[in-house]
Every structure is written in C-alpha cells, then in structure tokens.
Amino acid sequence: DVGDQGQALILCQGLLQLMKRGGLFLATYACAALVNLSQSKEDVKGPLVHEGIFRLCLNNLQSNDRDLMLYTLMLLVHFTKRAHHREESMGIGLLEELVEILEGSLQETEVRRRVLTEMCSVLGQMCNDSSTREKIFKNKDWQVLQKLLEVHDHVVTHERTPGGDLTPDSLVKLMSKAMFAIRQLCVFSPESMEQAGESIIPNLMKDMSNAQNLTHLDWASN
C-alpha cells in the first residue's frame, strides 16, 4: 500500500521523471508502476495530467518499443475515462497516434496482439465524445472502421477456427476490445453500424451458440 494521497503523488512524480529521463528500460517499468498506481489512486490523475503525462505518453508511443507502447496504452486506458482528460489528450495529437498504431499493426496482428488490444480499448473510450467520432469519419483516408473490422476479422478467421468453437483466452480480449471500439465509433451512425454488423454478426452468432463462449463476460457484453 502506497499510503495517503500525498505519498502516492510524490511517488507518481518520481516515476514521471523516470519516464522523461530514464531511457527505454526504466521508462517501461515506471510506466508499468504508474498503471497500478493510477488504477488504485484516482486522485493522482489530475496532477499528472497537469504535469504533462499525455505528452510523455505520446512520446512513448512514438518510440516503437513494443513493451513501452503496451504499458503506455494500459496507462492511457485509465487516463481517458474522463471527458476533460480526453479533451486534453486530443489537443496533443493522441488520436492521430492511435490511428498510426492501428495502421502499423494490421500486418502484425499476431505479434502485436496485446498492443492492439489496449489500443482498441483507448480508442473506444476516446469515441465516447462526438467530436472524436466526427473527426474520425471526416478523415476518410484513415479508414478507422474498416481497419478495426480487419483486425476483428483476422482474429476470427485466421488465428482460430471461425464460428462456433471455443474462443481461446489468448484471443478473446482482442476480439472484445475491437468490438468495443467498433461499437463506440458507430453508436450514432446507422450506416456504419450496418457495415459493422454485416462483417461481425455471422460469426458472432455462431460463437454465441457455444455456451462456453458466454463465460467471457466482457466479450459477450460487447
């Protein structure tokens, strides 16, 4: 247990300095520690946003170091739950970087599965805001919906036997988070929702016919 809020904040500020100046190795472990602290200590988030944590996260994502990217995305899952924090992250170009990660991961779905999973989770939360959804659909070159559908389709049809079999634990989280991001993006767009449904629903219905798959509650709810 870290202790009271003041001690937690001092520790977080020290970890933030390691993210800034510690090199890839120390930055990765500092980021992992911040994931745990920000999950259990909600009060540290505001000060860390004020200290520029989103800019540091953006730098980490641009490093292309897979472990650092993974823990940074896990950290961003915690820091993009509030609307004013998402607005702050939009101002420094986080959305554009998420789109870059999605684009760069399409040909490496198997090796970047965990990165893609956390990226989908962050992107889905960003799409809680209408301004984000509008920006994504306005930038037609991004083709975010099509790429998310490609990720989901690849997992369903290439990394496992499609339709009806028990979905391995190693794949279910990516399938779930990809569906979450797709649902959030399409929530007020019937045309896009129809496009997504045509791609996802046939295999989804087969998978749901296997009662064992319904034990994956996050997947079933999405």
Image (cartoon, grey):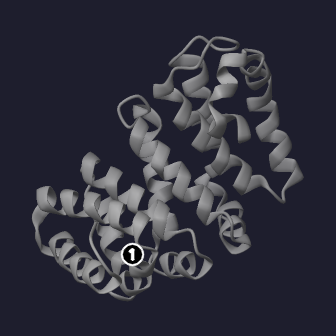
Q: Residue at x 34, y 68 (%)?
A: 57
State left or right for residue 65 relative to residue 35.
left
For the residue pair 201 and 171, the one nearer the viewer reads as 171
Residue 184: image location, x then y, percent: 71, 55
Amino acid at dot 1:
Phe
Q: Could you say which is closer to the camera, residue 92 or residue 35?
A: 35
SS at mark 1 in the image: helix
- Residue 87 pos. (x, y %): 57, 80
Q: Position of residue 219 (x, y in %)?
A: 65, 36
Q: Does any portion of residue 90 appear in the rendered image?
A: yes
Q: Nearer the viewer, residue 40 or 82?
A: 40
Compared across the picture, whether 97 is left or right of 202 comes to left
The residue tagged 1 is: 54
Q: Dot 1: few (<14), some (14–19), or many (≥20) neighbours within 10 Å?
A: many
- Tell me the residue at 58%/20% (across/down): 167
> Image point 67% across, 57% down: which residue?
140
Q: Is residue 96 left or right of residue 74?
A: right
Q: In the rendered view of the protein, which quadrant contains the N terminus?
A: bottom left
